Amino acid sequence: DAMVIQNPRYQVTQFGKPVTLSCSQTLNHNVMYWYQQKSSQAPKLLFHYYDKDFNNEADTPDNFQSRRPNTSFCFLDIRSPGLGDAAMYLCATSREPPGLTPYEQYFGPGTRLTVT
Amino acid sequence: EDKVVQSPLSLVVHEGDTVTLNCSYEVTNFRSLLWYKQEKKAPTFLFMLTSSGIEKKSGRLSSILDKKELSSILNITATQTGDSAIYLCAANTGNQFYFGTGTSLTVIP
């Protein structure tokens, strides 16, 4: 089945130790998103890729970086995780057609990051 | 500033009750309003609404958009314990999805 896959589902890292979360999709969607969701809060958009074009949210810390080597894969790199970065990280995809046709957004299962 | 507000923040009902969840939005270049259900995992898609006044229905769930009032409601009839979850709404404005903080629904047997 076409889907959005995130690995790992659970990640434990140490304070300051770089960590990479991965997302892959078989939907052939051209837009991929990374969200951070903390407990009892709405998902917060970190950045998104429109094809190869990277779009960073103004308030996303520099500590967060992303790579999209091809259509199917997107990575979230946290260079020096702090305790405040512990959260669920959600990857999502959508297909952006031309014009104003609305489109749905599909989420992966998320990676829960713990920082010790 | 673009924002989406949901109410109530939490709700506790008994099985069989009917609930109405509210979502209001203030965004530029509005395209659509989406509803998601989130249990202890990623959000799962419920509805996408683009036109005012047209109800979308899936089993016991239904939703409608009011573009004049910049709002949407999600109705759940004959609630079941499996409906317990956080319900998120999001306004789509092109490549951006603005999420509300969600309504936490608890259905008691």
Image (cartoon, rainbow, N blue to C red):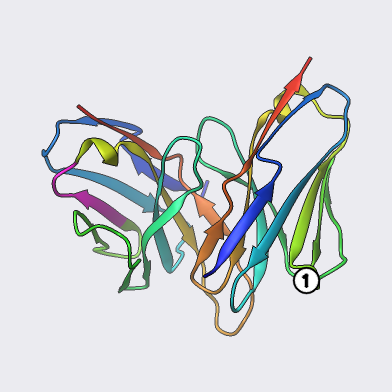
Residue furthest to the top? B109
Q: Residues within 10 Å of mark 1 (few under 14, many from 20)?
A: some
Coordinates of residue B44 in the picture (x, y in percent) = 59, 44
Q: Chain of mark 1?
A: B
Out of A70 and A92, give the one closest to the viewer: A92
Residue drawn at (67%, 68%) of the image: B32
Query: Residue B60: x percent and y percent?
Result: 85, 39
| B40 left or right, relative to A47 | right
Give the residue displayed 75% in from the left and 62% down from the top: B71
Query: Is B37 placed left or right of B107 in the picture?
Result: left
Lateral position of residue A73 relative to residue B4, left or right: left
Quadrant assignment for the C terminus of chain B: top right
The kind of secondary structure the magenta stretch mainly shows is: strand
The amino acid sitting under disc 1 is Lys
Locate residue B89, reporting x and y percent: 64, 52
What x and y, as percent, mark residue B83?
72, 30
Extreme residue toward the left, this view:
A17
Q: Nearer the viewer, residue A63 or B61?
A: A63
Left or right, A14 with respect to A57, comes to: left
At x 14% / y 49%, what residue is drawn? A79
Q: Is residue A87 placed above or below A35 in the rendered structure?
A: above
Please identify the quarter of the rendering in which residue B52 is found.
Answer: bottom right
x 40%, y 61%: residue: A32
Element under label 1? loop
Say if residue A42 shows up in the picture. yes
Circle 1 sits on which residue? B67
Q: Quadrant of residue B34?
A: bottom right
| Residue A56 forms part of the magenta stretch | no
User: Where does the magenta region start and end?
Assistant: A74-81
Q: Is residue A26 visible?
A: no
Establish if B33 lies above or below A98: above
